[in-house]
Amino acid sequence: MNAMADGVKRHGREQGSGDARRERWRTHRAARREEFVEAALRALDKHGPDLGMEHVAAEAGVTKPVLYRHFTDKADLFLALGHRGTEILFDRLIPALNNETAPLPRIRMAIDSFFSVIEEFPNLYRLLVRRSFAEKPVDADVVAEDKELIAAGLTALLGDYMRAFDLDSGAAEPWSHGIVGLVQNVGEWWLERRTMSREAVVEYLTQLIWAAIDGILRQKGVIVDPTKPLEVNKVIKMSPAGGDAEASGGSR
């Protein structure tokens, strides 16, 4: 019986040790993969969206076979870059959208968060819009997915505000998709032309979007001072990983 008990204990220790090793290996691979994604971002900055796997490998200080141990193909690395871009965007956008400030500066901060990303990572944005890596087309459309998620979050946010003002919230969804499309299209134009400063284009868009919102509110007899925080504050709960969005909030 003692021998059997000792065997069970040894098996348990060996199994636990094996699990720990596998977990360490998974953690190591995940960390290594993140390092290669950051190297790919640096390579993008140097070589533009036409970069190849050899540029990424050189930037990371490894050979291409080592790179392919962590990415099944070019599309896999493209998708990893897309996920990283989404993280960067949402890390800036969600706090701006949820800032408990007056409507006008809140709109301005949200728009500026997007422009700050495409200004800092222009080649990443161009790569994701083009949907190809090293001249190889990919199926993933990260930009479209992000647009859909942002529009869904904005729909929830605007819908809650409209209901709080006793307005028909049915317009929230088309408004949200219109706003997201407007900001993206202007962003792409600005990224290629750069005929004005980031501050200027953000301010023009801020005024345009607020003018549309203010016009609708006034038609319904609602007057809002855009420079003062609203008594009812709504925030977006948005998860890029989960692909869902909702708004919540209450009185200040």
Image (cartoon, grey):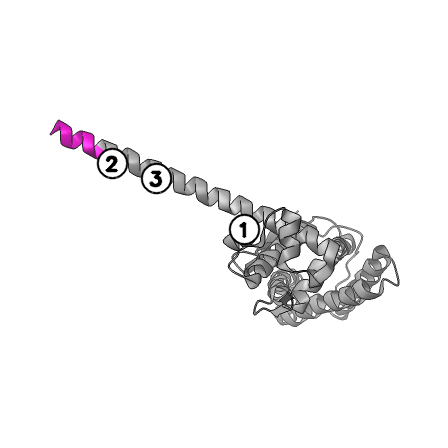
Q: Is residue 59 above or below residue 157?
A: above
- The residue depicted at 57 percent of the width and 48 percent of the height is 34
Q: Amino acid at mark 3?
A: Gly
- The residue depicted at 65 percent of the width and 60 percent of the height is 52
Judging by the rendered image, the residue that carries numbered circle 1 is 66
Image spot of residue 94 (x, y percent): 65, 52
Mark 2 or 1 closer to N-term? 2
User: Which quadrant would residue 224 be assigned to in this image?
Assistant: bottom right
- The residue depicted at 71 percent of the width and 64 percent of the height is 126
| CA–CA distance in space, label 3 to label 2 | 10 Å
| CA–CA distance in space, label 1 to label 3 | 25 Å
Depth-wise, is mark 1 or mark 3 nearer the camera? Answer: 1
| CA–CA distance in space, label 2 to label 1 | 35 Å
* Highlighted magenta segment, given as a residue range: 1-8
Q: Amino acid at mark 1?
A: Val
Q: Amino acid at mark 2?
A: His
Taking depth in this image into account, of 245 and 104 the one nearest to the observer is 245
Mark 3 or 2 closer to N-term? 2
| Residue 90 visible in the current orientation | no
Q: Quadrant of the N terminus?
A: top left
Please give the label number shown on residue 18: 3
Q: Is residue 242 left or right of residue 231?
A: left
Q: Around disc 3, counting alpha carbons within 10 Å, would you say few (fewer than 14), some (14 to 19), or many (20 or more)?
A: few
